[in-house]
Amino acid sequence: MLQTPLFKAVAWLLSYPDEVMITALPDVIDAIADQELLSSNQVEALHRFGEALRAQDLIDAQEYYVGLFDRSRQVSLHLFEHVHGESRDRGMAMVSLGEIYAEAGLLPNPAELPDFLPMYLEYLSLLPLAKARQGLLDVGPILQAIHKRLAARQSHYAVPFEALLDLAGLDTLADQSEVEPADDTPEAIDRAWEEQAVAFGPENDPQKGADCGRASAMVDRMNAYKSSTKVAEAAK
């Protein structure tokens, strides 16, 4: 049984916009409003988001989603991409995350990686509200950074991220002047290919020594919660 269904509803808003997703948008946003966990201004913004998405041609909406989230590392919906990049540490963290999902009774979509934000939100929907909010705080800096970049691009997808920050009790990063240039323009993609050095072997891993504290802390806290829940159940 979902304990915090609002998180699953927001996950729906960030999922790939197929016909089923688009058709259900009004009901999903109404369900979010009924839970009364977001401000009225935030709910109104979500309604406008839904209307804008429904007004788009479906093919255009799908192309925009793929172009935005799949071609840009800056706004990737894969959480560990923002911490580990393509290093082996990311793979190890995702194995741990997948095990935590399984323990919670969540059967991940095999077509998606465990660190896909909508999947993580679905996991949080299985937790009590306080624990779910803590789960958002664990990835809060990532959510803030993605929101800032989406807002700088004037993307309507900034709105669901505002809702997540609202739920976590976090402020948005208002200063848009320090946003780095978008990495998904044709010029930026060409530059990345030109600048990327060919390297083989673990000693040449460009992510070696990268700060993975945020992802590790998230997984550690989730494991701690899982252990405490088992202890509480055993004491009954």
Image: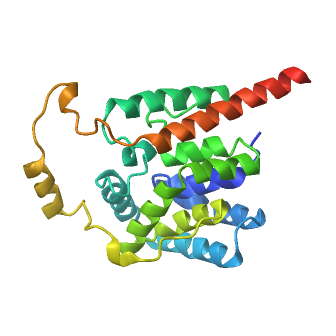
Q: Residue at x 22, y 39 (%)?
A: 206
Between 171 and 203, the one lying in front of the other is 203
Work out whether residue 89 or residue 149 is closer to the camera in this orientation and state it. Answer: 89
* Residue at the image point whose x is 66% and y is 72% from the top: 43
Asked whether residue 185 appears in the rendered view, the answer is: yes
Q: Quadrant of residue 207?
A: top left
Residue 127 or residue 145, whichever sits in front: 145
Image coords of residue 162 (percent x, y): 55, 68
Please state the total of marks drawn on the protein image: 0
Q: Viewed as shown, does residue 147 lie left or right of 209?
A: right
> Where residue 174 sits: x, y (%)?
47, 76
Quadrant occupied by the C terminus: top right
- The scheme the figure's colours follow is rainbow
Question: Hey, which residue is sitting farthest top in the picture?
Answer: 234
Measuring 58% from the left and 63% from the top, which residue is drawn there?
A: 165
Residue 207 is left or right of residue 222, and the answer is left
Quarter-of-image position of residue 42: bottom right
Assign the N terminus to one quadrant of the image: top right
Image coordinates of residue 71 in percent, x first then y, are 28, 53
Residue at the limit of the structure toward the right, as seen here: 236
Residue displayed at 33% across by 41% down:
210
Q: Quadrant of residue 186?
A: bottom left
**Any part of residue 154 in sight:** no
Q: Vertically, is 83 above or below 109?
A: below
Above or below: residue 14 compared with residue 170: above
